[in-house]
Image (cartoon, grey):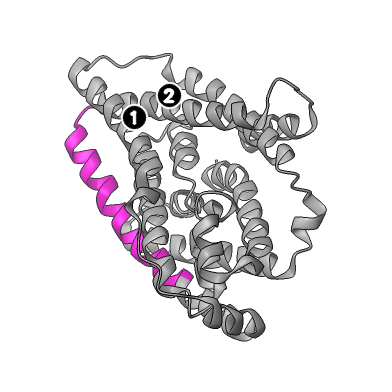
Amino acid sequence: MTVLMTLGPLLLAMILGYVFPVKALTDARVSRGLTWLTNIILAFVGFGIGSLDQLEDKLSIAGYNALWLFLLITGFNMATLYLSGHLLDKAHRDQSQSASQSIPFNWQNLSGALQTVGWAFAGGIAGYLLQQPLHFIDQVIIWLLYLLLFLVGRQLYLGNYRLRKLFLNPQGLIIATVTIVSTLLAGLTGAWALGLEVREGLAVVSGFGWYSLTGILLTGMGSPVLGTTAFLLDLGREVAALILIPFLSRLSCHINVGYSGATALDFTLPLLAKCHGASVIPNAIASGFILSLAVPVLVPLLYTLGQ
């Protein structure tokens, strides 16, 4: 029942956004709305974290756990995605090797992530200075989160993403499956090494780079330290993907698309296309879509296991 009460409204909000026509919500307005909602929610989350008792100790724990989980996920993802690309995608690997060029890293790619971090940091500073927890903040975050997922659903509709077509893309499905399995194995290993509960280890790694959602979900479910860990972990994954994509493009598109996680659908897609050619776009969109859809399902589902 706990799982259904947590998961049901999240999925319903996304589905309603996908199927319910709102003509006023144009692509530009949805994009701006998602940006502002994400920033506002993260500012609230930051405020809640900043007002925690013994903040320094909890932040050090979150940072330590995020670092080790990041290293484990990177290792597990890279190894398994390299094998899947080597065994199952030889044709595209050869195309990537011939198409890839020396593409310099562009710090402008990080501007969106840095702005988002700034909102969370500003909220944290405000919470730390005021030291006055807002008891209604969790409810505000939840309702804003429903609206966020409604807009995500609308964005998917406006982008003409059809579920059947995306789920039937073989390489995208393989990449997403390998990424999910290897990430969860990293979460299990991390839970054992860091002394976390199995459900915590699995849930905290299930953001697949969508840092603006995973941290919000876990914080809203009553675990701000785990939410902070997820935020730092997924932010680190997105930054690492932007840095590594140009250097790993000669190996296999599986590595770059899979490690980009949910962001392969949007944020890292232009860089993926530049490094691997236009032929990678259907695979990246399919994998990114499946992983994006998995986040609001897996995080609450795994976190509430055994409760």
Dividing the image into 4 quarters, which one contains the N terminus? top right
Tell me the kind of residue under disc 2: Ile
Q: Identify whether 143 is placed above or below 62.
A: above
Q: Identify whether 14 is placed above or below 97.
A: above
The label on residue 18 is none
The residue at 68%/36% (across/down) is 153
The residue at 53%/56% (across/down) is 270
Residue hosting label 2: 40
Is residue 285 toward the left or the right of residue 117 in the image? right
Number of numbered labels in the structure image? 2
- The answer to whether residue 289 is seen in the rendering is yes
- The answer to whether residue 5 is seen in the rendering is no
Secondary element at tag 2: helix
Secondary element at tag 1: helix
Dividing the image into 4 quarters, which one contains the C terminus? top right
Q: Which residues are magenta?
A: 53-77
Residue hosting label 1: 119
What residue occupies the far right of the structure in this picture? Answer: 164
Tell me the kind of residue under disc 1: Trp
Q: Identify whether 269 is placed above or below 58.
A: below
Tell me residue 83's x, y (percent): 55, 82
| Residue 66 belongs to the span the image colors magenta | yes
Tell me residue 104's x, y (percent): 36, 65
Report, in whole angstroms, how far the alpha carbon at label 2 lies from the one at label 1.
7 Å
Tell me residue 243's x, y (percent): 36, 62
Q: Nearer the viewer, residue 239 or 55?
A: 239
| Residue 243 belongs to the span the image colors magenta | no
Circle nearer the N terminus (2, 1): 2
Tell me residue 108's x, y (percent): 36, 48
Q: Identify whether 57 is placed above or below 198.
A: above
